[in-house]
């Protein structure tokens, strides 16, 4: 690294792309500050050629002049990691938006960069090592309570080789800038350690061994946990046209998923949607811990009207924070809405760089970037032997709702689970509008082998139900051509069984306070009822008999779905349902 | 210091190149034409001393010997109460007969609102149009387009909504307007008395294309200033497809790589940064944004309506002179339905739409010559009443009356137990004798 930071001056500018003539040594993706009109605008080096560097500026560039000074920072675009990330709301450059609002009022001023973590707050630190203990990077040296979790303080990830604790502070109250330990490295140099550290956001943060994701993350949504489950440390995507309920689905998952840390990245979407999270999560209870939902949530928010270049950065900032908590042995979940906006940001920049465009003008490296992004998910056994996971889900907003477009296709090539939302299902008010006939999950069969007994049982039933659903769909199509009269009673029953499974299991009412989430035991119980119905041979005489029976039965089961588990009616209703099924048995 | 340069090096599309020093991105320049007259231009890029200017009035007739003077400030718009009742073009010059406006200038395209300062919207906007108030309720700070096709009365609908709401200020941004449309708005607002609280920025179809791009920014900058002064502002933008097309024309003339059907890759961001100006400021004013998006070929998957749909909070489909009850959606209606309005509102509206959907199917059966059941006939009777008394855009009723009318229609078509509405509401509000 250069001893002195490089500097340069603006020689050309178009939009937020600057050409900088520089002296000194610079590196690709190095941070820069463009000094203009008394302000300092953050940017990033994206191309170097001779003594000219192309820089993408993360802010509006109005007012930039020929000759404006540019300072190179040596650092790459980094995320500050430490206690206090949870409950925060950041923009795509990890600027704390609440603090910005306190300083600047209603609007987002340009060139204001505040520190992401609270410098004043004292954390109650408990050491986990003593002087003389051997450590390496990512070893725990202590912990502080943050919300509901034990936030592990780790040896900085940049620490090289083996080290020895020289000194560790006693339990007590410290700020993130206070020295809590001294560590001697292999060369005998003693480094001072605080609770905060930085990590370049575009590099995967992963220390430990990768493990095969073979356990499910329960989302509380039956259509996901049932036929299209997601593994802890797995990946999924939710493409869908506008109005199909992508955002409601993402909010549902962010509220109910069994993760210890949830990171919501609002990337290029409506600000209004973030506001709902911001205003509601502090009031909603976390079903797992009884604390408030906001206590486990970190929000990265670079909405559609915020600078496009920072939008690209926002998904990496979110991912790095997720990886950081995973490194402590926690189950983390990252939800990005929407990765299409991120891809569009890449496209805009690629256009300005005059790169040769690929399909629909997206850059040729689109699919490799998407693959790199999702590869950061995973299950790891960290250096302390604890297991942590980062599960990643991305919403995709395909143009015209057409899944053939490049972002959807590149995403499908790398994710483990595809939850495709369809307009026809949302028009029919079948929510969540995940289309059970086009969606898939690679984890489904895996869980049939690796899951516990309950999970295996569920997989078996759902497998059968899905087959019936497909048959049912075929019969439905036939029926719309030849009319009900042209279909045999036997087929009508299959059709009705498929509809029954769809309406009581796959569909779920997000606005009912009980049905909004369904725990794993309850899912199994319901699946068993569905399985019984599917396996039963009924003794109907006419089509009308069959139809009436299933309409009735569906209604009863839906009412049962609305009944809380603790309710005395819960058992009664279940027995009534089973009784009714037995009554019509052949 | 004002710098003047006497040579234009290169002219292409709406872009002219000048050799100049010390200019900044976004700086405004005045190009004085040899043939008389002058036009504004904006610095859009520079490379060394070669500066590219976007000429607002277009480069038609610009000569290599024309003089360029850099003004040292970016594009601004005048703002103040004296804008009300006035009409301006895309460069901010008055085009009515009135005098020059002497007010402070404010920058256009200012910073975006801090999401952390936004609040959940919960104030209803009454339009007295049943298809809006009752079925797709508008909420203050909502951004919503009217999806339509040429020939539909979308401007009439826009004008009517504007005149019937109690907004403090109306700002109209017209893009690619025909002269007739412009006159229509002016006369409508004058007649309804809304003109005194209205300010118009109008780009006519024959005006230079660059001005079309400026109109929404001008309109929204003015709206934002009123909003921070505690005013509830209603912004009308018609037609956003013209705006997108202007962006397409300019980006292609600048040799930018097009992404989808010739539109620039930034189409989504360009639209979003305008729509996202809609806001309800805690303890102060608000901006509500209703736009028109005409769909080329009635195709909702066309890039303009498609991108718009991902940005806005719902949409109204205007088809055959009525607001289509199926495709139309107000994403914010849940915030006010049954909370600000009467408790039966949500259930009643849903039931009516569901029955109307069934009625459509019954009508299909009727037109195919199938025998109709008694229930089918009830549905058809209902659909006729629903269309005449609620869907017709001529209907003008307060929300309370709309709800009562809904119950009356149900009572005259169906039995008490046939509507599927909660018993509680039927007891309390039903019109069955």
Image (cartoon, coloured by chain):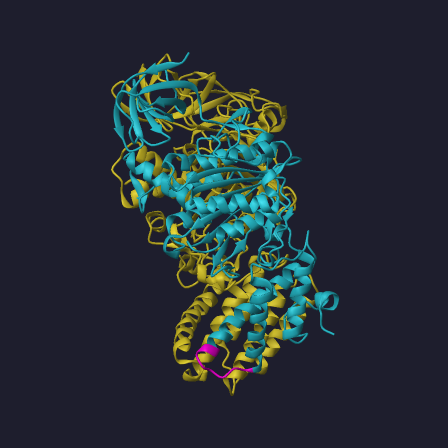
Chain colours: A yellow, B cyan
Question: B306 or A324: which is nearer to us?
Answer: B306
Q: Say if residue A261 shows up in the picture.
A: no
Quadrant (top left, top right, bottom left, bottom right) of the C terminus of chain B: bottom right
Give the percent coordinates (x, y) of residue B124: 64, 48
Whether B139 is drawn above or below A298: the answer is: below
Question: B48 or A195: which is nearer to us?
Answer: B48
Question: A110 or A253: which is nearer to us?
Answer: A110
Instruction: List the single residue furthest toward the bottom.
Output: A541
Residue A21 figure quarter: top left
Give the percent coordinates (x, y) of residue A411: 36, 48
Residue A62 figure quarter: top left
Q: Which residues are magenta?
A: B366-373
Quadrant (top left, top right, bottom left, bottom right) of the N terminus of chain B: top left
Residue in the image at 41% along x and 50% along y: B306
Whether B229 is drawn above or below A533: the answer is: above
Left or right: where A18 falls relative to A93: left
Whether B413 is drawn above or below B276: the answer is: below
Q: Is residue A531 magenta?
A: no
Give the percent coordinates (x, y) of residue A581: 57, 78
Residue in the image at 55% along x and 47% along y: B188
Give the percent coordinates (x, y) of residue B202: 46, 38
Instruction: List the single residue furthest toward the front.
Output: B97
Principal secondary structure, stretch drawn in magenta: loop
Q: Say if residue B220 shows up in the picture.
A: yes
Q: How many marks?
A: 0
């Amino acid at each position: 690294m250069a001893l002195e930071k490089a500097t340069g001056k603006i020689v050309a500018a178009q939009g937020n792309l600057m050409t900088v003539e520089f002296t000194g040594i610079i590196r690709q993706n190095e941070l820069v500050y463009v000094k203009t009109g008394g302000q300092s605008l953050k940017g990033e080096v994206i191309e170097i050629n001779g003594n000219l560097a192309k820089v993408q500026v993360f802010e509006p560039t109005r007012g930039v002049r020929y000759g404006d000074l540019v300072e190179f920072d040596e650092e790459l675009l980094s995320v500050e990691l430490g206690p206090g990330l949870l409950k925060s709301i950041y923009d795509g450059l990890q600027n704390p938006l609440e603090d910005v609002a306190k300083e600047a009022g209603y609007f987002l001023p340009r060139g204001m960069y505040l520190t992401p973590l609270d410098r004043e707050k004292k954390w109650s630190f408990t050491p986990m090592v003593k002087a003389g203990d051997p450590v390496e990077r990512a070893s725990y040296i202590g912990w502080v309570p943050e919300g509901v979790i034990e936030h592990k303080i780790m040896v900085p990830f940049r620490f090289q080789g083996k080290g020895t604790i020289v000194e560790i502070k006693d339990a007590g109250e410290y700020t993130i800038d206070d020295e809590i330990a001294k560590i001697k490295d292999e060369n005998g140099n003693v480094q001072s350690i605080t609770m905060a550290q930085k990590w370049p956001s575009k590099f995967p943060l992963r220390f430990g061994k990768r493990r095969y994701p073979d356990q499910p993350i329960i989302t509380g949504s039956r259509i996901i946990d049932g036929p299209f489950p997601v593994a802890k440390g797995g990946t999924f995507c939710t493409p869908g046209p506008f109005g199909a309920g992508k955002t409601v689905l993402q909010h549902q998952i962010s509220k109910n998923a069994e993760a210890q840390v949830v990171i919501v990245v609002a990337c290029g979407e409506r600000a209004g949607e973030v506001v709902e999270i911001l205003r509601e999560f502090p009031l909603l209870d976390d079903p797992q811990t009884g604390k408030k939902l906001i206590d486990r949530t970190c929000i990265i928010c670079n909405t559609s009207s915020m600078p496009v270049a920072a939008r690209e950065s926002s998904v990496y900032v979110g991912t790095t924070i997720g990886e950081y908590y995973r490194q402590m042995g926690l189950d983390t979940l990252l939800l990005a809405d929407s990765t299409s906006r991120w891809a569009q940001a890449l496209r805009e920049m690629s256009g300005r760089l005059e790169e040769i465009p690929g399909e629909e003008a997206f850059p040729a490296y689109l699919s490799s970037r998407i693959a790199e992004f999702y590869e950061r998910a995973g299950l790891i056994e960290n250096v302390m032997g604890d297991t942590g996971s980062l599960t990643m889900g991305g919403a995709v907003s395909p143009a015209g709702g057409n899944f053939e477009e490049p972002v959807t296709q590149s995403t499908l090539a790398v994710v483990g689970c595809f939850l495709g939302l369809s307009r026809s299902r949302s028009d029919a008010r079948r929510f969540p509008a995940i289309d059970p006939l086009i969606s898939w999950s690679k984890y489904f069969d895996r869980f049939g082998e690796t899951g516990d007994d309950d999970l295996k049982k569920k997989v078996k039933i759902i497998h059968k139900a899905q087959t019936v659903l497909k048959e049912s769909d075929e019969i439905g199509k036939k029926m719309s051509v030849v009319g009900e009269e042209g279909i045999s009673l036997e087929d009508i029953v299959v059709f009705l069984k498929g509809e029954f499974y769809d309406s009581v299991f796959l569909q779920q009412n997000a606005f009912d306070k009980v049905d909004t989430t369904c725990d794993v035991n309850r899912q199994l119980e319901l699946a068993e009822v569905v399985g019984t119905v599917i396996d039963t041979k009924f003794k109907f005489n006419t089509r009308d008999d069959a139809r009436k029976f299933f309409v009735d039965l569906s209604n009863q089961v839906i009412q049962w779905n609305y009944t809380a588990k603790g309710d005395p009616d819960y058992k009664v209703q279940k027995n009534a349902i089973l009784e009714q099924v037995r009554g019509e048995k052949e | 210091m004002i710098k003047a340069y006497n040579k234009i090096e290169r002219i292409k599309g709406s872009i002219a190149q000048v050799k100049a020093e010390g200019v900044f991105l976004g700086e405004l320049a005045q190009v004085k034409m040899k043939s008389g007259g002058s036009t504004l231009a904006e610095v859009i890029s520079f490379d060394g001393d070669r500066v590219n200017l976007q000429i607002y009035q277009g480069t038609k007739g610009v000569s290599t010997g024309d003089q360029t003077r850099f003004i040292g400030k970016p594009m601004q718009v005048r703002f103040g109460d004296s804008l009300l009742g006035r009409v301006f073009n895309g460069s901010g010059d008055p085009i009515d007969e009135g005098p020059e406006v002497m007010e402070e200038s404010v920058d256009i395209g200012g910073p975006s609102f801090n999401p952390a300062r936004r609040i959940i919207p919960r104030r209803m906007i009454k339009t007295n149009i049943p298809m809006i108030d009752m079925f797709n309720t508008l909420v203050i700070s909502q951004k919503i387009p009217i999806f339509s096709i040429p020939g539909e009365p979308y401007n009439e609908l826009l004008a009517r909504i504007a005149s019937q709401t109690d907004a403090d200020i109306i700002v109209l941004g017209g893009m690619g307007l025909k002269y007739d449309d412009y006159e229509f708005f002016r006369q409508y607002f004058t007649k309804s008395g809304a003109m005194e609280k209205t300010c118009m920025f109008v780009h006519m179809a024959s005006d230079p294309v660059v001005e079309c791009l400026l109109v929404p920014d001008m309109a929204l900058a003015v709206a934002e200033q009123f909003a921070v002064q505690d005013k509830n502002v209603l912004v009308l933008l018609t037609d956003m497809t013209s705006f997108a097309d202007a962006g397409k024309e300019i980006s292609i003339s600048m040799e930018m790589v097009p992404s989808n059907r010739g539109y620039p890759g930034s189409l989504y961001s360009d639209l979003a940064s305008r729509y996202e100006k809609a806001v309800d400021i805690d303890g102060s004013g608000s901006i509500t944004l209703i736009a028109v998006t005409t769909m080329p070929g009635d195709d909702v998957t066309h890039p303009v309506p498609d991108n718009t749909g991902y940005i806005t909070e719902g949409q109204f489909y205007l088809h055959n002179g009525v607001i289509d009850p199926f495709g139309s959606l107000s994403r914010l209606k849940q915030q006010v339905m049954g909370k600000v309005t009467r408790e039966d509102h949500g259930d009643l509206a849903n039931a009516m739409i569901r029955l109307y959907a069934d009625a459509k199917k019954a009508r299909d059966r009727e037109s195919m010559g199938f025998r109709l059941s008694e229930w089918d006939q009830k549905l058809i009777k209902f659909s006729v009443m629903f269309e005449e008394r609620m869907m017709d855009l001529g209907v003008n009723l307060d929300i309370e009356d709309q709800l009562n009318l809904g119950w009356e229609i149900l009572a005259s078509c169906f039995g008490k137990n046939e509507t599927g509405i909660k018993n509680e509401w039927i007891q309390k509000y039903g019109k069955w004798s």
